[in-house]
Image (cartoon, rainbow, N blue to C red):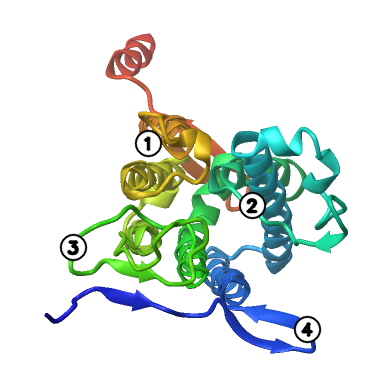
């Protein structure tokens, strides 16, 4: 009988040079920043913004992404371990039982999201001097594309795998760790997420370039949260638990953490309906315009 399943026997390592491993994940992570920078550069140029702002933006994003993702994993997914080994949260090696260089194993996307929001709030105060929602609206577009690259990196690592399936596109993750039978076909949940994030990126690009969405503070940011974390919430049903203690949970940690982001996204979309961006041609500083109600407008006319 002809098997329709996909044998995923790809090594996560591209090559090894003198003991230094070059992996697909690292390459894809780097590509996320390269493509993200070029996309953001085009957006900044179209709005006549300073390239100095852009360079500082990516420094803030890079640093806060790593810090937030690392803390998110340690606090929400493996606190039982890291509470006993707090130095390993910040150090890329361990001493117990022997010294070993580990790198930063364990990064959480929800933590990265919080880190980016905090970082861009600080950026808006120190660099752009504009509303934090203004920069969030512009930063989330390449970040959605970065999510695609990162999940493809997870696929190359054969990690964050899905549950067993009899669907014809099921993957046999030959190199996956922590599973009893690597020959069992499973949902390629990393690929599902990657596709959803790529579609989200396309939708956000359409809103930015083809509509006036960027004139409404918080709309693109809100749509990003709704698209990304709604997809994440439902795809989690098809994933194997990332931690053993999640096995008996009706909703896993990823789903519980996704819910407030979706709610925040809905709130931002509603907020954006009454907060339009108006940029001064002299100073370049924007002031959010709050849409007045019809009753308020009639009151102004009556006073006149």
Determine crowd level at label 3: few under 14, some 14-19, many 20+ residues with C-alpha closer than 10 A: few
Q: Are marks 1 and 3 in contact (CB under 8 Å)?
A: no
Q: Which residue is mark 3?
A: 167
Among numbered discs 3 and 2, the one appearing first in the sequence: 2
Q: Hey, which residue is sitting farthest left in the picture?
A: 1
- What number is the disc on residue 269? 1
C-alpha distance separating marks 4 and 1: 50 Å
Among numbered discs 1 and 3, the one appearing first in the sequence: 3
Q: Are marks 4 and 3 in contact (CB under 8 Å)?
A: no
C-alpha distance separating marks 3 and 2: 30 Å
Among numbered discs 4 and 2, the one appearing first in the sequence: 4
Q: On screen, 14 above or below 270?
A: below
Is 103 on the left or on the right of 294, as rendered? Answer: right
Across and down, in percent, residue 3 comes to 18, 78
Across and down, in percent, residue 52 comes to 74, 65
Q: Which residue does the image show at 58% across and 49% down from the upper left?
A: 135
Q: Quadrant of the N terminus?
A: bottom left
Is 131 on the left or on the right of 17, as rendered? Answer: left
Q: How many marks?
A: 4
Q: Which residue is mark 2?
A: 106
- What number is the disc on residue 19? 4
C-alpha distance separating marks 4 and 3: 39 Å
Taking depth in this image into account, of 71 and 31 the one nearest to the observer is 71
Q: Hey, which residue is sitting farthest front in the picture?
A: 180
Taking depth in this image into account, of 32 and 268 the one nearest to the observer is 32
Determine crowd level at label 2: few under 14, some 14-19, many 20+ residues with C-alpha closer than 10 A: some
Across and down, in percent, residue 161 comes to 41, 58
C-alpha distance separating marks 4 and 2: 22 Å
Front of the two marks 3 and 2: 3
């Amino acid at each position: 009988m002809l098997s329709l399943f996909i044998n995923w026997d790809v090594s996560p390592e591209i090559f090894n040079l003198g003991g230094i491993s070059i992996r697909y994940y690292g390459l894809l992570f780097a590509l996320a920043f390269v493509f993200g920078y070029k996309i953001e550069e085009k957006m900044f140029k179209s709005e006549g913004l300073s390239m100095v702002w852009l360079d500082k933006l990516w420094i803030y994003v890079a640093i806060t992404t790593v810090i937030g993702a690392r803390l998110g994993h340690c606090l929400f997914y493996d606190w039982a371990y890291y509470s006993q080994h707090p130095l390993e949260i910040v150090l890329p090696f361990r001493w117990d039982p022997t010294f070993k260089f580990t790198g930063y194993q364990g990064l959480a996307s929800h933590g990265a999201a919080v880190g980016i929001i905090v970082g861009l709030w600080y950026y808006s105060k120190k660099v752009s001097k504009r509303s934090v929602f203004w920069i969030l609206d512009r930063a989330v577009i390449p970040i959605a594309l970065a999510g695609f690259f990162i999940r493809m990196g997870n696929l190359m690592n054969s990690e964050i795998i899905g549950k067993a399936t009899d669907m014809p596109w099921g993957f046999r993750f030959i190199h996956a760790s922590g599973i009893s039978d690597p020959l069992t076909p499973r949902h390629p949940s990393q690929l599902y997420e990657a596709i959803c994030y790529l579609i989200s990126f396309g939708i956000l690009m359409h809103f930015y370039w083809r509509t006036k969405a960027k004139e409404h503070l918080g709309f693109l940011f809100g749509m990003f949260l709704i698209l990304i974390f709604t997809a994440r919430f439902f795809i989690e049903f098809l994933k194997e638990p990332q931690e053993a203690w999640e096995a008996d949970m009706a909703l896993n940690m990823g789903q519980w953490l996704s819910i407030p982001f979706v709610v925040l996204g809905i709130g931002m979309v509603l907020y954006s309906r009454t907060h339009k961006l108006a940029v001064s041609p002299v100073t370049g500083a924007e002031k959010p315009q709050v849409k007045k109600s019809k009753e308020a407008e009639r009151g102004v006319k009556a006073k006149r």
